[in-house]
Amino acid sequence: MAVITTVLDFVLPPTMAFLLLLLYPALTFVRFLKFLVSLLVFEDVRGKVILITGASSGIGEHLTYQYAKRGARLVIVARRENLLEQVADRAMTKGATDVHVIAGDVTKQEECKRFVDETINKYGRLDHLVNNAGIAHSFFFEQAKDAFAMHPIMDVTFWGHVYSTYYALPHLRRSKGKILEIASVVSVIPYPRQSIYNSAKAAALQFYETLRVEVGETIGITIVMPGWIESEMTRGKFVGAEGELTEKPVHQRDAHVGPAPVEYAETCARAAVLGVLRSHRYVVVPYFYYAFILLRVYAPEILETLFRIFYVHHPIEQKPLSKVLLDTTKAQQVLYPQSIQKQE
C-alpha cells in the first residue's frame, strides 16, 4: 500500500496538471457555448412556486421583487412579519401572481419543516428554494466573549439553509426544481473580523457543491457569491463579540467594509435570479471579486498580506489602512453613500 501511495504521489499530480492543460481550452469553449445558449433559452417562472428565506430586507427583499416581475407565486419567510407584509404588498404591485407570508425562524428545524409543509399545502408544489437568511459579525476571533457568542451566526447562515433544503428536497425532486443559494465571496476569500461568518459561508458552499454531486441533474443548484452588498449588514447590523445584535452606521464602525464599493441589493438580486433561470453554476457579483478568488487560488500569500494591511492594522497608524484611507479622504461618501444615507 505504501508503494502504491508513493507512486501516486509522484505520478498523479503532474499527470493531472498536464491533462488539464490539454483539456482546458476545449472545456472553456464548451462553457462559452453553454453561456450563449443560456442567454437565449432560460426558465420561465410564471406561475411557479418560489420559497424565499430572509425576505424581509436586503438581498432577500429584492430577490422577491425580481421573481415577482416574472409572475411567480411567492412564499416569503422571515422573523419580522410586519416587514414581510410590506414586501408582499410591493411584490404584488410588481407582478407576482400570489404572495404568501410566513413568519418563521430558520434556526429551528421544526420551523423550516413548517414553512415548507405550508407551501406544499397551499400550492401543491415547490419549484425554487431560495436560501438567503444570514447574519454576520465584526470582531476578531480572539475578541469573542465565549464560543456561545458565535453560535447564532452558524445557526442562521449555515444550519438554517441546511434545514430548509432537507425538507424541500423531496418536493424539488418531483418538480425538477432548483435551489438558489446565497453564499458569499468570503466562502473563498479570508476577510478578517469575520472568521465564523466566513466559515459558515464556506460550509454552505461545500454543502451545496457536494449536494450537486449527489442529486445529479435532477435538481439545479446555483450558488451566488456576492461581495459587499447594500444590506442591513453593510449598514452596521452585526453580531457583537458578546453575541448581541448591534446596529451602528458603517462609517462609525471600527470594523467596516473598507475601501471596496458596496453594490446595490437590487443589482445583486437581478444577477442572482438571472443566474438561476439560466442554470448557471455560480454567480459572482460584483464581477471584479473574481480577481480576489484568483489570488486565493494561485497566490494566497499576496491576498493574505493585502488583507492584513487593509483590514487588520497599519504598521505606522496601528489601525486598519482601510480606516486610515476612509477617514482622511472621506471616500465612504463615494464608495457606499447608500449605506450612510439610510442611517442619517
Image (cartoon, helix red, strand yellow):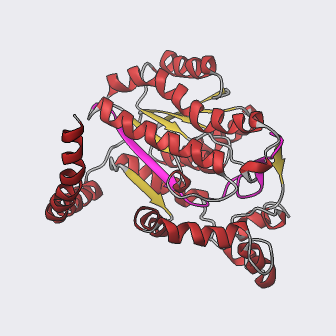
Q: Residue at x 49, y 54 (%)?
A: 188
Q: Position of residue 17 (x, y in %)?
A: 22, 60
The answer to which of 20 and 322 lies nearer the viewer is 20
* 113 horizontally vs 273: left or right: right
Give the extent of the magenta segment.
218-243
Q: Position of residue 158 (x, y in %)?
A: 57, 36
The answer to which of 271 and 201 lies nearer the viewer is 201
Q: Residue at x 63, y 46 (%)?
A: 197
Determine which quarter of the picture holds residue 235.
Answer: bottom right
Above or below 22: residue 314 = below
Q: Is residue 329 visible from the viewing direction of this image? A: yes
Q: How many marks?
A: 0
Above or below 80: residue 93 = below
Above or below 34: residue 135 = above
Q: Quadrant where the C terminus lies?
A: bottom right
Q: Is residue 99 visible from the viewing direction of this image? A: no
The answer to which of 79 and 296 lies nearer the viewer is 296
Q: Position of residue 131 (x, y in %)?
A: 53, 38
* 124 horizontally vs 334: left or right: left
Q: Residue at x 84, y 56 (%)?
A: 248
Q: Position of residue 105 (x, y in %)?
A: 67, 27
Above or below 304: residue 5 = above
Q: Quadrant where the N terminus lies?
A: top left
Q: Is residue 329 magenta?
A: no
Toward the front, the furthest residue is: 3
Instruction: Kindly report the secondary structure that dominates the magenta region of the rendered protein.
Output: loop
Q: Residue at x 65, y 28 (%)?
A: 107
Determine which quarter of the picture holds residue 27.
Answer: bottom left
Q: Is residue 235 magenta?
A: yes
